[in-house]
Image (tube, grey):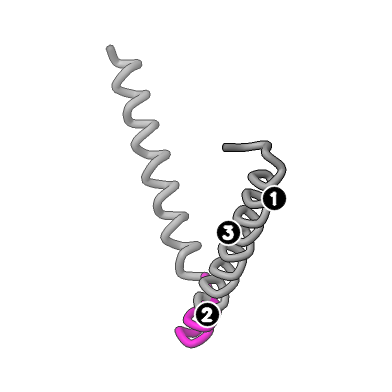
Amino acid sequence: MANQIKEKTDIKEALMAYFKSVKLEWGKITWPPKQQILVETIYVVIITAVFTIAVLAMDTIFSAIFKALGLTN
């Protein structure tokens, strides 16, 4: 019984130490400016849209080719 209480205390102390170190490291982070985040987010959305359209175009083209060759319904 005493061993279980000690294990729970050890786990609690370990978790507290972990979260204290997380809080300490969190303060060391250098965050980019809002403008940079906005611009990079727009780049990601545009690139994702371009690749999505490219995959859609390839799918449409190959579907038409396979259909013309009679390989699909």
Q: Residue under circle 2?
A: 32
- Can you identify the residue that label 1 sits on? 65
Return the residue nearer the eye: 57 or 45: 57
Q: Which residue is mark 3?
A: 56
Which element type, helix, strand or loop, lies under badge 2? Answer: loop
The residue drawn where x is 37% and y is 45% is 16
Q: Which residues are magenta?
A: 29-40
Which amino acid lies under the numbered mark 1 shown in the image of this protein? Ile
* Residue 30 belongs to the span the image colors magenta: yes
- Name the residue: 44% across, 47% down: 18
Q: Position of residue 19 (x, y in %)?
A: 40, 51
Tell me which numbered mark, 1 or 2, is placed earlier along the sequence. 2
The alpha-carbon separation of the residues under discs 2 and 3 comes to 34 Å
State the image quarter where residue 15 is shown: top left
Q: Looking at the figure, which quarter contains the C terminus?
A: top right
Amino acid identity at mark 3: Leu
